[in-house]
Image: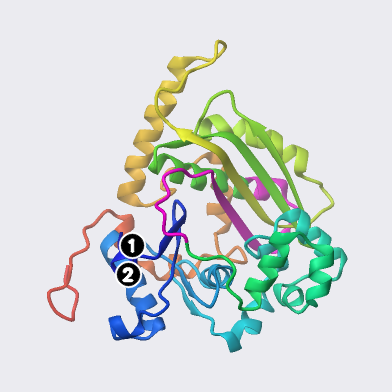
Amino acid sequence: NVMRRFTPQVEEYSIDEAFADITGLRRPLKASYETIALRMKDAIEWELGLTVSVGLSLTKVLAKAASKHRKPSGFTVVPGRAIPLLLESLPVGGVWGIGPATASYLDKLGVRTALDFARLAERTVRQRLTKPGVETWRELRGTSVYPVSPEEKSVYASISKTKTFAPPSADPEYLFAHLIRNLESACIKARRYGLAPRRVAAFLKRQNFDTSGREARLNRPCAHPLELSPLLRGLFNDLYRRRDLYRATGVVLLDLAPDANIQYSLFEDPLRAEKIRELYDAVDAVSRRYGKHALHLGGSHLIEVRGKGRRGDPTVREKTCPYGKTRRKQLGLPLFRPASGNAET
């Protein structure tokens, strides 16, 4: 709704992602496209108390890539002349619309970055890829193929959480800790919207960007990591290869259903399941007051011990938050709207 105050052309892509078309609004809003997007970002963060990353570019694929360029609260503008700068450091598997199978196929063709892909001849792309691949290629080159669809979305098919880290690791417990954290983050989002998955998928990305994945179907919809972690361990054991180095982990919750009036199977213990539900009600209450992952499974604790930064060190946020709003938010202290240019608490 905050975004729709700036433009009616807003597409809800997922629970926490959206596209906005601000074409032609410079004159009505008396501002540049960059200023409009920045105002939108500031309004969301101020009114909702959330950090968001915004990407501004010519197409949806480019805008999504730009939004991921700087996180957790980034703002990246990619005009046409700057497209190569964005794409040269983006792995082709990280492009929206290119899945693991397509990325692996392109890698065999010597295409490893998004820029390599965008520079392919059109004839080559049409001969070797299907229609979605051609459309993604065109979007990367600055030609808009996918319009913003403003129809309000009420059903979400999946929720995914990934983590890329450096240097790559072969430590199974460290990798599984990240996978557990992926699961916890995805389940937090699902519970926030009253949803639970019927299927859970996990994947590991190797140092060479090859990706392997497995999925499993649940007896009933469930968004509680305590119940799902044994299943995740089984998926991980199927995927992990001791001699490989891995650079990313991910979890996807699929076939989301309303988390209400769940029917238990004949061999389940409904009392235990209800106690776990009550436990996570308490976990969510603590998280709202003290910050996400204030309480977490022991399986993800290795991340806390080693640090969550890019190379295992404490992140910039962890080092600097005592003087900023992140710490206040984690402690559950109120944020006051300033009456003048200076904030007071």
Q: Is residue 309 visible?
A: yes
**Image quarter hosting the N terminus:** bottom left
* Marker disc for residue 259: none
User: Of helix, strand and loop, which one carries label 1?
Assistant: helix
Establish if 172 lies above or below 208.
Answer: above
Whether label 2 touches label 1, CB < 8 Å? yes
Q: Nearer the viewer, residue 16 or 118?
A: 118
Where does the image place residue 33, in percent across and percent down from the top left? 40, 82
**Image quarter hosting the C terminus:** bottom left
Where does the image place residue 258, in percent across and percent down from the top left? 43, 33
Total numbered badges shown on the rendered structure:
2
The amino acid type of the residue labelled 2 equals Gly
State the residue at coordinates (23%, 57%).
333
Q: Is residue 207 visible?
A: no
- Report which quarter residue 162 is drawn in: bottom right
State the residue at coordinates (72%, 63%).
133
Q: Which residue is mark 2?
A: 324
Q: Residues within 10 Å of mark 1 (few under 14, many from 20)?
A: some
The amino acid type of the residue labelled 1 equals Arg
Establish if 292 lies above or below 265.
Answer: below
Q: Which residue is mark 1?
A: 327
Measured in 3D between alpha carbons, the distance from the residue under mark 2 to the one under mark 1, in whole angstroms, is: 6 Å
Magenta-colored stretch includes residue 165: yes
Q: Which residues are magenta?
A: 149-176
